[in-house]
Amino acid sequence: MPTTGIPPLGVTRTPDGTRFAVWSRNAARIDLCLFDKAGTKELRRLAMLREGDVHSVTLADIAVGTRYGLRADGIYSPEHGLWFDPSKLLVDPYATELDRPFRHDSRLTVFGEETADLVPKAIVTEAKTVKTKPPLFEPGGLIYEVAVKPFTILHPDIPKKKRGTLAALADPVVLDHLKRLGVSAVELMPIVAWIDERHLPPLGLHNGWGYNPIAPMALDPRLVPGGLKELRKTVDALHKAGIGIILDLVFNHSGESDRLGTTLSMRGLDNLTYYRHATDQPGELINDTGCGNTIACDHPVVQRLILDSLRHFVLTAGVDGFRFDLASILGRDMSGFHRDAALFAAIAADPVLSDRVLIAEPWDTGPGGYQLGNFPEPFLEWNDRARDDIRRYWRGDRHAMGALATALAGSSDTFSRWGETATRSVNFVAAHDGFTLTDLVSYARKHNEANGEGNRDGHDENYSWNNGAEGPIDDPEIAAARQHDAMALLGTLFASRGTIMLTAGDEGGRSQRGNNNAYAQDNAVTWLDWSKLDDKLIDHTARLSAMRRRFGVFADTRFFTGMGDVAWLRLDGHPMTVEDWEHPATDNLVMVLATEDRKQKRPTRLAVVLNRSHAPHPFRLPASLDGEWCDALSDAAPPVFAPARSVTFFVEVF
């Protein structure tokens, strides 16, 4: 069944009235429930008419602001994948605004327990569209990953009522910070409505990241209390500052979780349709996400929901693009992942979506789930292999030089396998998931005890180091060493070919106290303390960003040819040999690039000198016939020695 054969779902305002429609193949009956303005008293319950698998009702007396929910009746037999329970109020998957956040309660998991007082009510809104423009962000730019609440909740110069909300991103102090860093686009971690995992409330913890969604189009009232209007205004403010906006969306699982989870929306409407199940046991949910369930992205109804969600955010808010969490699931069916999956083709062919920025987290936890390099163009892909190779080099691992150079050059070994001539890599050294940049050089092992899982959660291997002591220290030498290492990691990131990503606060030395899975720490562990940021590190990041914009060679996504566009040298100025590349303890490298200098407005050469040794080393740059080399970050003359634990940049000036 093609997605085009499905009539409009959700709420549609027409001259004849307001139409409510929902899809369910297996429900015997679906009722529309209307509530008072407080969302506490059910005023009317109307049976929806069925045509095929679409249940709908059109009412003439529905005003904007009306609160509503759904109830589905039918067979309750979880062992057969059927979860129909009319005592459960259900959220419309097409809801675009909710009157309150989701909260976990055991009644949401028990058959026959009434839940209307617990479940958010969807709100009827008047659809408003914006004039869409081509995305501001282009591959090769700097993405700044932001968790909305932690980023601004402690900022002293933002009005208190805005702190921790999406509107704070439009505040002048935030925009000034983003412009100082040269951010091309902010990537917002999930801002749609989510629910806490059931094990968190008894621990006194709450999900602070939002990767546990229920309603894919409805903005979470905690983060975006002003709804779509607030999103539109924030997008507009960022665009006026020359900054794009990318939404991180989760279509791989929902917060309804496993068989012991909640019944809030899709499970209660048609569990067998919306989620993937074992073929021999219809009641057994497939868990390719590690989150309890897997959304059936190969089903036309689910594909329609995903496409409509993406269109919704483009048409009503003008967002530039999307990052997809555990994106391999978008291309999965029961036989595995397919780069030519119908959903990918539908996005590429859609007139609203075809020019949007698309970023994949190219893995899931299911069989064959790791798909780095296998997504179709124009998808950009998070490159965890480059992340780990950069970390391993700076940690001092042996046999690390070749992998580092490959990462710097855009990972052609990964992204050329389908005949492509340009990289689609998103390079990063730290992201929301894992250690922060500062923790990467301050902790040799994870410290997730505060998550209440006995430190069993989160990755065990982080390729991290602590510079001689674990965690917080008073030793100025260790503190200086950590700062130098952080600066070196940033230098490596900004010297890499293709798109790069920086997580908010890493430019200023933020720490999560060694927690590498801080999703449940909606508290001071993740909240950015602006008063403690390292301005020297921020200034270094800003200088690196300005340098990267000055020389287009880094943002250029085409693979190097080796025909005069790049040279790999030793510190003595001679070309790297096979023996140099393969030697287990090679510490140093000079990358010489042909580039355009936008400041000089002419072609030139740029040399990037990497020295991971703990001692300075003498180095020689290639001879310059018509000019001289100078420091690309400070315009000073190049030193005789490459500083210990450093990445330095030199430009040939004329």
Image (tube, grey):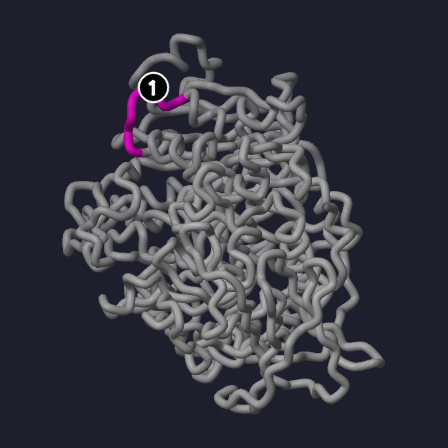
Residue highlighted by disc 1: 399
The quadrant holding residue 580 is top left
Element type at marker 1? loop
Q: Position of residue 151 (x, y in %)?
A: 43, 66
Q: Residue 560 location, x and y as percent?
A: 61, 24
Q: Is residue 354 left or right of residue 254?
A: right
Specify few, some or many for label 1: CA neighbours under 10 Å numbering under 14, 14-19, or 20 or more: some
Q: Is residue 409 above or below residue 11?
A: above
Q: Which residue is painted at 30% across and 30% down in the image?
A: 616
Instruction: Write the start and end of the magenta stretch as one range.
Output: 395-401
* Residue appearing at x 71%, y 36% in the figure: 602
Rendered location of residue 252, percent (x, y): 51, 49
Q: Quadrant of the C terminus?
A: top right
Residue 588 showing in the rendered view: yes
- Foreground residue among 345 and 353: 345
Taking depth in this image into account, of 77 and 56 the one nearest to the observer is 77
